[in-house]
């Protein structure tokens, strides 16, 4: 037996596309419609047999390992449907798909729900209104107005497809297409339901209760199995996905499991120390500002941040302190402040040169896009 690669004129490392192109080129020259010489026809069969082996990954591997590659049913002709499979590879026809089922799986649906930071932290239950495909109550999803079964299509005789003969460079080729009369179902609803026009479903608005778990954030999706679009012909419904959109809080900024808040304290409070009330998702919290606190310092309040999803723990509340410098002073205040500076050995005009640093709050705002 001659080498199959030599028969097609390709190297052993040729790709599937290169093998296909080589075969098509030779087939045009050797086809009976082009060259009726009997000797040429033998060559055409040999080339076609070589293509059948080399175009099939498993047969090609078997051949490369020393086997014939043809399998038990090939023989010397085109047994086992090999030649028709080659035609299908060129023209996409010949495969008997059969009728399509009328009952089909429904599609998934997506709806976005906005929650505030408090709801995202502690969870909530929300009633949402969704418009999607539901089973037609008039025909119970069957599509027929009189509950009768669909009748066999007289065009395709229930096969769901029609066949057509086409001429090509390889001669006559049989192709199959979905039947245009029954759209490939193989049957026709003779008396379609007026409510759903035979589809078995209609559009309707539904109210659905959704439990939103603690710890969700923007982009999280909650899956409600079977609450999506009902399938055609009374098919099972897909799933409904509720995507969370977290609304911006007026003064709290979320960073994963932690919350951040910025407060301003007076120069005296920062210098002497003080206890201040800070707003949080749990209500007002007392926070201690220690004596000597500098502007940009942070105070962590553990367990007052966001709830971790599918966990009972919470992140922290990070309080960012900004020390206020008074804008206007009375003469008495100015004099007291000068005495205070003198007692510390400070002189007007004294400065301390710092490196290329950026204030903490500027970094904080940049990090959060504020």
Image (tube, grey):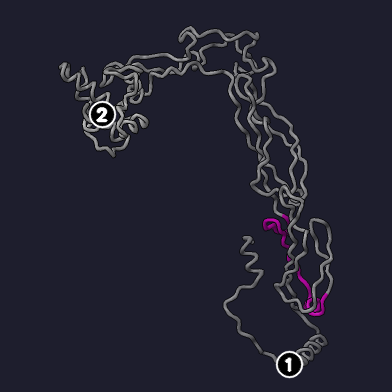
Q: Which residue occupies the foreground of this view, 54 or 225?
A: 54
Q: Residue at x 76, y 54 (%)?
A: 313
Q: Residues within 10 Å of mark 1 (few under 14, many from 20)?
A: few
Q: Nearer the viewer, residue 220 or 278?
A: 220
User: Circle 1 is placed at which residue position?
Assistant: 345
Number of numbered callouts drawn: 2
Of badges 2 and 1, nearer the viewer stands: 2
- Left or right: residue 203 compared with residue 173: right
- Report which quarter residue 336 is drawn in: bottom right
Q: In the image, is residue 29 part of the stretch drawn in magenta?
A: no
Q: Which residues are magenta?
A: 249-273
**Disc 2/disc 1 C-alpha distance (Å):** 97 Å
Quadrant of res 194: top right
Using the image, tell me which numbered label, if any, was put on residue 23: 2
In the picture provided, is 110 more to the left or to the right than 336? left
Q: Earlier in the sequence, mark 2 or mark 1?
A: 2
Q: Which quadrant: the C terminus? A: bottom right
The residue lying at 30 percent from left, 32 percent from top is 66
Residue ID at (24%, 38%) = 11
Element type at mark 2: helix
- Answer above or below: position of 292 versus 65: below
Query: Which image quadrant: the N terminus?
Result: top left
Looking at the picture, how far across and down is residue 180, in whole percent?
Answer: 46, 15
Looking at the picture, how far across and down is residue 83, in whole percent?
31, 20
Q: Nearer the viewer, residue 362 or 291?
A: 291
Q: Residue 254 magenta-drawn?
A: yes
């Amino acid at each position: 037996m001659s080498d199959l690669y030599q028969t097609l004129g390709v190297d052993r490392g040729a790709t599937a596309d290169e093998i296909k192109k080589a075969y098509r080129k030779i087939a045009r020259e050797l086809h009976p419609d082009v060259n009726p010489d009997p000797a040429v026809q033998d060559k055409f069969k040999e080339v076609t047999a070589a293509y059948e082996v080399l175009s099939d990954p498993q047969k090609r591997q078997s051949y490369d390992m020393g086997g014939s590659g043809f399998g038990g049913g090939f023989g010397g002709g085109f047994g086992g449907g090999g030649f028709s499979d080659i035609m299908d590879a060129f023209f996409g026809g010949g495969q008997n798909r059969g009728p399509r089922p009328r009952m089909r799986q429904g599609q998934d649906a997506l709806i976005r729900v906005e929650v505030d930071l408090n709801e995202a932290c502690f969870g909530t239950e929300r009633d949402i209104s969704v418009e999607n495909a539901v089973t037609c109550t008039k025909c119970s999803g069957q599509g027929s107005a009189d509950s009768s079964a669909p009748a066999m299509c007289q065009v395709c005789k229930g096969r769901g497809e029609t066949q057509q003969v086409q001429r090509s460079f390889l001669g006559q080729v049989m192709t199959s297409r979905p039947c245009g009369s029954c759209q490939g179902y193989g049957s026709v609803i003779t008396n379609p339901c007026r409510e759903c026009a035979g589809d078995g479903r209609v559009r309707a608005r539904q109210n659905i209760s959704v439990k939103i778990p603690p710890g969700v954030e923007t982009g999280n999706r909650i899956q409600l199995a079977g609450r999506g679009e009902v399938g055609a012909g009374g098919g099972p419904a897909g799933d409904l996905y509720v995507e969370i959109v977290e609304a911006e809080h007026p003064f709290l900024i979320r960073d994963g499991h932690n919350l951040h808040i910025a407060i301003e304290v007076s120069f005296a409070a920062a210098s002497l120390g003080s206890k201040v009330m800070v707003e949080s998702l749990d209500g007002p919290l007392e926070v201690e500002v220690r004596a000597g606190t500098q502007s940009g310092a942070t105070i962590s309040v553990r367990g007052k941040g966001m709830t971790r999803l599918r966990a009972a723990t919470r992140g922290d509340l990070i309080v960012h302190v900004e020390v206020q410098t008074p804008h206007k002073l009375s003469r008495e205040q100015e004099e007291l402040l000068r005495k205070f500076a003198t007692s510390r050995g400070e002189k007007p005009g004294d400065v301390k040169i710092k490196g290329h640093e950026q204030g903490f709050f500027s970094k904080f705002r940049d990090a959060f896009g504020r």
